[in-house]
Image (cartoon, coloured by chain):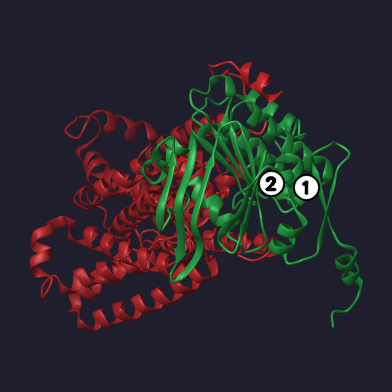
Chain colours: A green, B red
Amino acid sequence: MLEIQDATVRYGTRTILASANVAIAPGSVTVVVGPNGAGKSTLLKLMTGEIAPSGGRVRLDGRALADMPARMLAQRRAVLPQSSALSFPFTVAEVIRLGLEAGGHRLAPRAIGEALRRVELAGFEARGFDDLSGGEQQRVHMARVLCQIGDPSRWTEPRYLFLDEPVSSLDIRHQLTVLRLAHALAREGAGVVAVLHDLNLAAAFADRLLVVLDGTIAAIGEPAAVISDALLERVFDLPLRVGELPSPGVPFVLPQTAAFASLKEPRS
Amino acid sequence: MIIDALRAVPLVQPSGTMSGDRSVRARRALVGLFLLLAIVMVLGIGTGPALLSPGKVAAVLLSGPNGAAGSPADHVIVWQIRLPRVLLGALVGASLAVCGAVMQGLFRNPLADPGLIGISSGAALAAVATIVLSGGILAPYAALAGIYALPLAAFLGGLAATLLIYRIGTLAGRSSMALILLAGIALGALAGALTGFLLYLSDDRQLRDITFWSLGGLGAASWTKLLASAPMMLLALLAAPLAARGLNAIVLGEAEAFHMGVRVQWLKRGTILIVALATGAAVAVSGTIGFVGIVVPHLLRLWLGPDHRGLLPASALAGAILLIVADMAARSIVAPAELPIGILTATLGAPVFLLILLRRRGAGGI
């Protein structure tokens, strides 16, 4: 269990996150949504141990994250970055191997090949990372993170996977590919936390939605319970209409006609 | 499912190579470079006003420092004159190349080099100050540190310069190479001015010492100099591979390196210490020899890839080879005089630096 208790993050006098309380259970998918600058990334950084709270506590299985050595943390959780440019010409295989090493696994060419197949980049081992498109690079990072998390059948303790806008540069097919992989890991016992901007993907993917607004957790719960016209309108300051997908129980969000219309009209 | 695939992975690493993995090539290259270094060292010992055949060099070396092989003159030439020079060249070359590779990894930029970003200038200023002031206000220090006074001072000067440049060039964990290069220019100019001021204070003998030293070269190599500087360079060279895994991970970014289990602050402190140690010692015994740290890692990356586990030891070996060969050329081209070795490395290195700049110009800035 990853627990955040009364955690506050301040930079100077600015409070980015105020007394946040949330627990991430293994085997679940939590999706963080909210407007730009609400504090989503800060919340994620708290959970990964990248920043320490100015007040409050962040604990993994009862142990403060700040007290855990970086190497031990790397064997418990992996993080998919938004984007990451390389400064030197690594091949795809060399990038993914970093994940295997970080997870404390032996170098196994088959694991690299299989991870690449999972993200639909089979045979890309020898390609130069810098020569790939943005979407391909993001999927290589996903393969790296999968290798760091390792094989669930060998886990002695649950693992955690953090995804920071994992689908931002992916086409619609590969958005689903990446989210399905994360979802499958959750079903195998991993605690998955993802920041997503697409509310509909979020609703379909999440066991639990976490809405962040102005540095506070505005709502948390099942997507169907959290996604409501009133809440979303408050969070995003935009008239939104919530419907329901044919698959029952999954909410679907569209901007109201008025908001669409304003796209084509000059603002007064 | 990936789960099944991962499950099927054998525990023991198979001996076959994986496509896209250049580590096997790197291991073979290390063996080749090591053999080449041995050959170059023997040739380096044989080259000079009195030419000695490789066979004779090997025989005199193998007979030991008090051995009987060869004439007494050969023995003095090999053991007293050329062996310390070649060993010093090997250590300095290895240090400069490894420092370049480590700095480039830390700053995530192939243009970073201790010589270009002012670290060598800081070390040089401290060394000149020690030479000039060791009769005056630094006399207690000089007496205390003995033969280590010069390398130790150069280390401290290099360390101060490194910390200053890192502070200036890095904001919120992101390093700006443009800022670092410009700060290096400013620091180099300041160190140059202060060095000039110190030259005014120096007497004739000191002035000659400084001039010879600052041209950069191995001309004054001796066992004493080797003994004074080798421990610092060896310490840095042996410690550098410990940073290889961290430097690989930091290629993706500092946050990503932390996510992958690297203690980033320790990595930075450790690598800065390594660079200051090796650069300081190298500058103290051989002046400023430029561009070795740019050229060697750059060529090796093209050949072996950027994995620091291969790159760092390969840089050490190739840097040693390059400097011994450059020293042989410096001794031979205008014999019986000697060219400052820095002239040769700059002639070779500056074009390579420009080549990297041209390549990166297309890729969007330095």
Q: Is residue B279 above or below residue A175?
A: below
Letter of the chain that mark 1 sits on in the rendering = A
- What is the CA distance from the residue labelled 2 to the residue labelled 1? 8 Å
Q: Which residue is mark 2?
A: A166
Amino acid type assigned to the residue bearing label 2 in the image? Pro
Q: Nearer the viewer, residue B104 or B74?
A: B104
Q: Say if residue A137 shows up in the picture.
A: no
Q: Residue at x 34, y 40 (%)?
A: B238
Are callouts 2 and 1 both on one chain? yes
Residue A18 on image: x %, y %: 49, 60
Letter of the chain that mark 2 sits on in the rendering = A
Q: Residue at x 75, y 53 (%)?
A: A228
Residue B324 on image: x %, y %: 40, 48
Secondary element at tag 1: loop
The quadrant in which the C terminus of chain B is found is bottom right
Q: Which residue is mark 1?
A: A170
Residue B225 on image: x %, y %: 22, 53
The quadrant in which the N terminus of chain B is found is top right
Amino acid type assigned to the residue bearing label 1 in the image? Leu
Residue A37 image-quadrant placement: bottom right
